[in-house]
């Protein structure tokens, strides 16, 4: 997964996040890919052990317009229960809270 994501640096990637009935789509000009590990003693179930950090300028695509991401990165929480697979030229990450699909195509959908 990391090798494939790194190959997309300098390109536009699309992130589709499906959380219950809510679908978010993010367009990101990918500049870097990294993992951030947390060694904190977790008391909050929402805090992940690891986050996939996709860095770059991005926009949230929705019916209200295309606001910029609040920061210069998009974080995806990854835990021991997360399932990461390659599917049809995309990375699919299934977490306890949401499903993510990262691709270099805008029409890719979360399965």
Image (cartoon, rainbow, N blue to C red):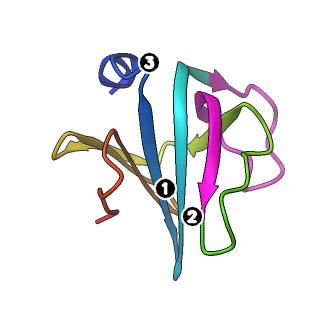
| Tag count | 3
Let me know if residue 60 is in the magenta part: yes
Q: Marks 1 and 2: CB-CB under 8 Å?
A: yes
Check disc 2 and report its element: helix, strand or loop: loop
**Residue 32 image point, x, y percent:** 55, 17
Work out how far the residue at label 3 is from the one at label 2, CA to CA, in angstroms.
27 Å
5 vs 76, nearest the viewer: 5
**Front position among marks 3 and 1:** 3
Residue carrying label 2: 97
**Front position among marks 3 and 2:** 3
- Badge 1: few (under 14), some or many (20 or more) residues near its Cα, within 10 Å? some
Identify which residue is drawn at 61% across, 34% down: 51
Residue carrying label 1: 95
Which quadrant would residue 94 be assigned to in this image? bottom left
Residue carrying label 3: 9
Identify which residue is drawn at 28% across, 66% down: 111
Check disc 1 and report its element: helix, strand or loop: loop
Identify which residue is drawn at 54% across, 38% down: 28
Work out how far the residue at label 1 is from the one at label 2, CA to CA, in angstroms.
5 Å
Identify which residue is drawn at 31% across, 46% down: 105
Let me know if residue 33 is in the magenta part: no
Instruction: Judge from the rendering whether residue 84 lies leftward or rightward of residue 59; answer left or right.
Output: left
Q: Is residue 49 visible?
A: no
**Residue 96 image point, x, y percent:** 52, 61
Q: Is residue 85 visible?
A: yes
Q: Quadrant of the N terminus?
A: top left
Check disc 3 and report its element: helix, strand or loop: loop
Q: Which disc number belongs to residue 85? A: none
**Residue 50 image point, x, y percent:** 61, 33
């Amino acid at each position: 997964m990391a090798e494939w994501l790194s190959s997309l640096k300098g390109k536009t990637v699309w992130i589709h996040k499906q959380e219950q009935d809510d679908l978010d789509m993010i367009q990101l000009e990918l500049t870097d890919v990294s993992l951030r590990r947390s060694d904190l003693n977790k008391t909050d179930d929402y805090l992940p052990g690891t986050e996939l950090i996709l860095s770059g300028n991005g926009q949230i695509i929705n019916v209200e317009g295309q606001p910029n991401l609040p920061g210069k990165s998009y974080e995806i929480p990854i835990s021991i229960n997360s399932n990461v697979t390659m599917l049809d030229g995309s990375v699919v990450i299934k977490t306890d809270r949401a499903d993510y699909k990262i691709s270099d195509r805008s029409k890719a959908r979360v399965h």
